[in-house]
Amino acid sequence: MLALILIVLELLPNRDANYHGLRVYIRYLGIYLVSASSFKCSLDNANRSFYRSFNATFGKVGRIASSEVIVQLTKSKCFPAIYYALEACPLRVSQFKSINYVINSTFKKIFDIKSQEVVNDCLEMFNYPPAEKTIAVRKCKLLTKFKLSSKNCVVHLQITLS
């Protein structure tokens, strides 16, 4: 199925992904693939999903709960929406900056601050790494699981063949 989608993306016209001002997206397993000259994913819907879940959570809890509780709720309920399947997508520097902007703006809203230095201190205090590091760790986990599962498949294949 993924090979079919990649073929369709290659056959789409106009290599810089704009066709008379229209950008062509294909949704596959919750990831939005963009028609381009190379494999590319869109983060627009992931950002939208994150902000939707964060605003719902923050709207319910508001300023009643402590900031620690809000940060933990955000980590467990909202950030998975933005990190979903990004370990399988090749991301550009601008996309990492976009994710970091979402993280920074969230912490600014939780703590009601304007200074980036204070945001960096809060991120460090709550042990929240930058997007590059988080996605690298997730990618390493994915590759480790894939490596282990492919070994099992090879062993299973060898057993069934003999």
Image (cartoon, rainbow, N blue to C red):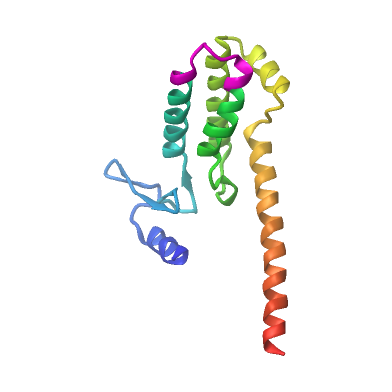
Which quarter of the figure is the C terminus placed in? Answer: bottom right
How many numbered circles does the render carry?
0
Residue at image point 43% right, 19% down: 59
Seen at 67% across and 80% down, the residue is 157
| Residue in the image at 54% along x and 21% along y | 106
Q: Tell which of 61 and 92 is nearer to you.
A: 61
The stretch drawn in magenta includes residue 37: no
Quadrant of the drawing holding the N terminus: bottom left
In the image, 38 versus 129, the foreground residue is 129
Residue 32 in picture, x, y percent from top left: 42, 47
Residue that extends furthest to the left in the rendered view of this protein: 20
Looking at the picture, how far across and down is residue 42, in whole percent?
Answer: 45, 43
* Residue 140 x/y as whole percent: 70, 50
Instruction: Tell me if residue 7 comes above or below residue 68 in the rendering.
Output: below
142 relative to 20, above or below: below
Residue bounds of the magenta highlight? 59-70
